[in-house]
Image (cartoon, helix red, strand yellow):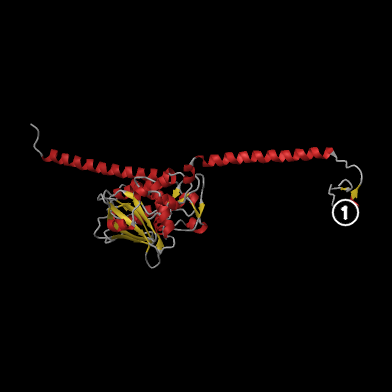
Amino acid sequence: MSSLGKSWQGDPCAPLKYSWHGPCEENKNNIVPLVAGILSALVFFIVLGIVLTIIWRRRNKNPASKQAVRSNEEVVLKTNNKQFSYSQIMTITNNFDKTIGKGGCGIVYLGYLQDGTQAAVKMLSSKSPEGSQQFQTEAQLLMRVHHKNLASFLGYCNEVGRTAIIYEYMTNGNLEEYLSVDPKREPLSWRQRIQIAVDAAQGIEYLHHGCKPPIVHRDIKTANILLNEKMQAKVADFGFSKFFSAENESYVSTVVIGTVGYLDPEYYISSRLTEKSDVYSFGIVLLELITGQPAIIKGHQNTHIVQWINHFLERGDIQQIVDPKMKGDFDFGSMWKALEAAVSCVPSISIQRPSMNHIVAELKESLKMEATREQEGINSIEMNVVDLEADWGPDAR
């Protein structure tokens, strides 16, 4: 073994031309940097391992944090206290024997819960491609929002091909039915109309400014404003609603959804949804309350209510705007303030529209003016009665 020469690599099997005889001198100065590099790399990987271990432990320390990141469907399914089976839905609706409403998303049935509470059961159509998403959106929203002017959520059913949302039952149906020409219904007074406007506006205001992050309804219309036995208005049907991902988000780019006549023209063109889209739709509702006309006025040429009202406003003909079914029984100042609020909601450019906070304040002022007129009218009648008794009664002796 000693007779074998060493190669430049120290390999005794290397070709002879690379070998030499004599002592092998190793450069010790090259070993020090090599060892230092190896140690540095070793220290780096040790530190990295410690850091990753700490991060992993912190993330897994609280199991609840993992559960917080769940899909909308999981959120719905975990709320067992409000979940009903399909067989229970059949019992509640008495095998779906009474229909109280129909829409593109499904049919609404009258039902009774076990404690006797009346309920409206909306069965979502399995034929609708958006049905499942609308169910998840509506159920999630209704479980997190609570306001006196939003329809109350009583429960849901979520079985394969059979989904339902259960609302509180609203005895007097929806606003669209009351504004339509129906001889069986007593026309709404101005006091009732402006109170309904305030109620609905407060519900929308809560979605925009009371929820964090804000929520845009996306389908505000008279058919989605329900009336209870006291004629209190509540906004309903949240299947198209959109959650903003952050409080400071100014708009959301999304597929255009809404109802013809109520749809914000800027949103229709740009696909940019903002809170002002709801403001526009509510402005149309307010114009319907004032005029008694639908959003799209049928005729030789269908006319949008904004175009129709602008025709009279340009001529200064206010009397032609107000619903004749009210027979002039209203405070003119109250009516004018409500009309101003409605017109301010419907510019085609969204930044020109006010917030729902502003609209609520204006409508409350309008309601106050009408209430004052009614109170003064009552006082006036009482004074007239007293005067008549004084004129025709016996003189004091």
Horizontal side of 17 relative to 172 (left or right) equals: right
Q: Percent x, y for residue 89?
A: 31, 57
**Residue 258 visible in the displayed image:** no
**153, above or below 303, in the image:** above
Nearest to the observer: residue 293 or residue 214: 214
Nearest to the observer: residue 377 or residue 83: 83
Q: Percent x, y for residue 312?
A: 39, 57
Query: How many numbered marks, from 0 up?
Result: 1
Q: Give the structural element (helix, strand or loop) at label 1.
A: loop
**28, above or below 355, in the image:** above
Residue at the far top: name it.
Answer: 397
Residue at the far right: name it.
Answer: 21
**Residue 309 visible in the displayed image:** yes
**Image quadrant of residue 185?**
bottom left
Q: Residues within 10 Å of mark 1 (few under 14, many from 20)?
A: few
Q: Amino acid at mark 1?
A: Pro
Residue at the far bottom: name it.
Answer: 300
Nearest to the observer: residue 133 or residue 252: 133
Q: Percent x, y for residue 180?
A: 31, 59
Q: Quadrant of the C terminus?
A: top left
The residue that appears at 13% across and 40% down in the rendered structure is 389
- From the image, tell me which residue sits under label 1: 15
Q: Percent x, y for residue 50?
A: 62, 38
The residue that appears at 89% across and 47% down in the rendered structure is 3
Horizontal side of 374 relative to 34 (left or right) equals: left
